[in-house]
Every structure is written in structure tokens, then in C-alpha cells.
Amino acid sequence: MRKTHALCSVLIAIVCLLTALDAAAQQAEYRARVTVAAGDSDRANTPVCVDVPVPSALARAELSSLRAYLLPADRARPVVGQVERPSGVGDNTLRVWWLLPACKAGEEPSFTLVIAPADRMSVPRFTWQDEPDDHLDLLFEGRPVVRYMYAFDPEDLENTKKTFHHVFSPDGERLITKGPGGKYPHHRGIFIGWNKTEYDGNRADFWHCPKGVHLRNTGFVENIAGPVLARSVMQVSWNDAEGVPVVVEQREITVFRQPGPFSLIEFVSTLRSRRDVVQLNGDLHHSGIQFRADNEVVGREDETHYIFPTDRMKSAELPKEPWVAMSFALGDERYTVCQMNHTENPAETTYSDTERQYGRFGAFFTHELKPGEILTVKYRFLVHQGTEPPSPELFHARYLDFVSPPKVTVAGAE
């Protein structure tokens, strides 16, 4: 009888503890009314974010233990969010990302934002899969999206002298970018470099990377992944032939979830001198941040063409060349890649000669990198798979998402 009584007491204590824990979790739940102003552009699947102050229990929680979602005021389907902990803000602040459902210019949809301890609900999400000292894959529900190539072998410099990002087709069936070999073997996926980098009376070619010059991955700062976006931040050392750094780079790749035939990739590069003044010099055809399509395009150059903004898409507030798109054929499919030039990039940025029908184009500028200076540039690549390329109007709308995103305001916690 005593044993039964003791067992009942233990069970009651466990139930009370679980109830108390559940109550604490409910108290930690954060709710707020947020409004999104579309502005002067139509929006569709636009990445947006907002920083919110949350209870300390949520702020201190492991991000993987939290979930976020937004309840539209019109009672439409809830929108999945993703929580991250931003740097440089208050200790009790979390950032929430989501994709804004389609809305017209001038509209201001409102939502109830909810951040709470995670339940057992599962949603499609990104994951990182590393092959140590070789490459890092980003997958979305098992479908490959991008691949960071970072192998380095002094005995095989020709194949490992540059870090770069491969891009998969939006359906994940094939790579649409080129690696080593083929026409112009130094062209590889999404890459960066200047062929006449000058420093201390010397010159290094970080475009072709000849004679031992190389870009080498020296570590990862973070790899995060969730249902809305995935981000990888890596350190890259731009070394001379003796292996001594000339420039150090922090490269950040963010991929946003997109529907159907699209992929959206953001490329951010932060450069610092490791010498005295470093002049990032070169010519239009051999410098900058570039995209190179698979080598198959070389034999199908007559199927490659470029798409440009129309005159009415240009204004004094935008760069001279805000974006350029290249459309090309691989196998039985057509792919179109639009590179977008942010308004905060160097003003003289232009695009390399778009007569390169073999499949290479990109943004070019020169810059004098002084000691202690930090140069940050950012671009987005919108990838489309389909028989007909998107219209210039669609590309321009997605460009405005990048440089003039919707404004999010928080009315306060509920």
C-alpha cells in the first residue's frame, strides 16, 4: 500500500512538473502585430525580416528549439518564419525572416507574428552537408541547391587554386555552372577576382591564379539553415605564390527558399588588405564578381542571349547598370541567370562584355583598398529554369526587392 501511495506521489509530481514547464513555455511565447508596406512595387515571395524584443526565456533558447510563423489578418494560410540571433543588437532581440506572400504596390498587409518553443510539426527546410576539405553542399529537402568548392592541394593547384560556388538547376537535377577544365579553365561557377591586383610594388593575378597564386578557404564562421533561408560564412585568404596573404575575404552566401522554377542566391564579399595599399585593378573582361555557365554552352553559343533593363527601369536613384540576365541552354532545358548590383556597391560598377556567348558575365569595378579599410559588396543571383526566360519586368521587380525591400513595422507585443 505504501509503495502504491509513493508511486502515485511520484506520478503526481511528474505531472505537476510537466504542467509547470508547459506553462513556462507558454509564458515565453511572443506575439506581436506586424505590418508590411509593399511600397511602390508589386511583391511576390520577397524575403523580409524584422527584429523584435522577446522574453529572456526565448532570447536565451537554442534557435533550433524555436519556431516562428505569421498569421495573416485575412485568415489566409499561416506563413512559415525562421528565427536567427542578429549581432550588434540587444541581448533579448531575435530576427525573424519570412517570404512575403504576393501583394500589390501600395498594399500594407498585417500579420500576427508568433515565436514559440518548437512543437513536433515539421516543415520543409534547408540542410548543409559537408564533405570535409573538399566541398559543402546545400540541400533543400534532399534537393541540391549550391555547392561550395573549397579543396586545396599544393600538388594539384590547377584544380584547387580557387574557391567558388557551383549552382544547381532549380529542380536539382544537374549543375548549371562550370568547374576546372573546359574553355577558360579559371572560370568557375560564381567567383571573384582581379587580374592586376597591385601591392607593395608587386602584382598578383587573382583572376587566372597562375604560378602558385591562389585563393584558399581558411575556415567557416557559421553555417545556418532553416525553412526560409540558409547561410554560410567562410574565410578566404588571397595568397601570393609564397602563400602569404595579400587580401583576406569574408564571403557570405545566403540562399532563400523560392517556389517552382526559381533559386535566389545572395553573394556578399567583405575584403581587407593584409599589406599596405592594395589596388584591385584589372580590365572589364578579367575582374569582378562573375558567373560562368556549364562548359556545354560553348558548343551552343547561338542559343545564348542577354536581357537588359528597359529605359523606363533606370533612374538616378539606381546604379547605371542595375542588373543583367543571361539566358542559355543545357541539355533540353533553358536557364536564365540574373545578376543584381546593389546600390551600395561602388558607383562605377559595370557589367563585363555581354558578347561572351560561351556563358560568362558579371559585375566589374576597380578599387583602392587602404590599410584598415573594409570593402563590402553584395549581389543577388536569381536563377530561372523554363522554356521562356522571365520578362525584364519580373527581373526588375525582384531587383527592387533587393535594393528597396518592403518596410516592416511592429505595433508591439500582444
Image (cartoon, rainbow, N blue to C red):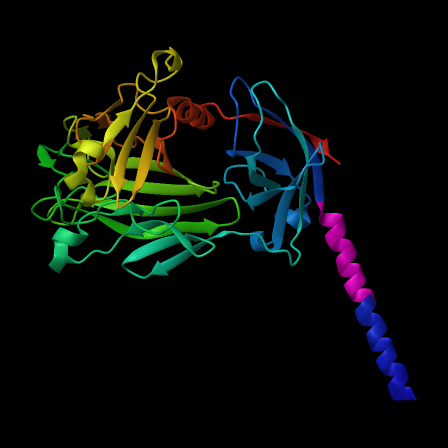
Please state which of residues 211 and 68 is positioned toward the viewer in this rendering: 68
Please state which of residues 159 and 397 is positioned toward the viewer in this rendering: 397
Q: Looking at the image, which residue is at 16% across and 40% down?
A: 298
Q: Looking at the image, which residue is at 39% across and 58% down?
A: 129
Residue 222: % across, % down: 42, 50
Locate the C terminus by quadrant. Answer: top right
Residue 286: % across, % down: 15, 32
User: Visible in this render: residue 370?
Assistant: no
Magenta region, main secondary structure: helix
Apparent side of residue 183 relative to residue 136 in the rendered image (left or right) = left
Q: Looking at the image, which residue is at 39% across and 15% down?
A: 313
Q: Which residues are magenta?
A: 16-29
Apparent side of residue 28 relative to residue 240 in the rendered image (left or right) = right
Circle count:
0
Q: Looking at the image, which residue is at 83% across and 71% down?
A: 13
Please state which of residues 207 and 86 is positioned toward the viewer in this rendering: 207
Residue 28 magenta: yes
User: Visible in this render: residue 120?
Assistant: yes
Residue 79: % across, % down: 62, 41
Residue 104: % across, % down: 57, 22
Compared to 385, does 161 lie above or below?
below
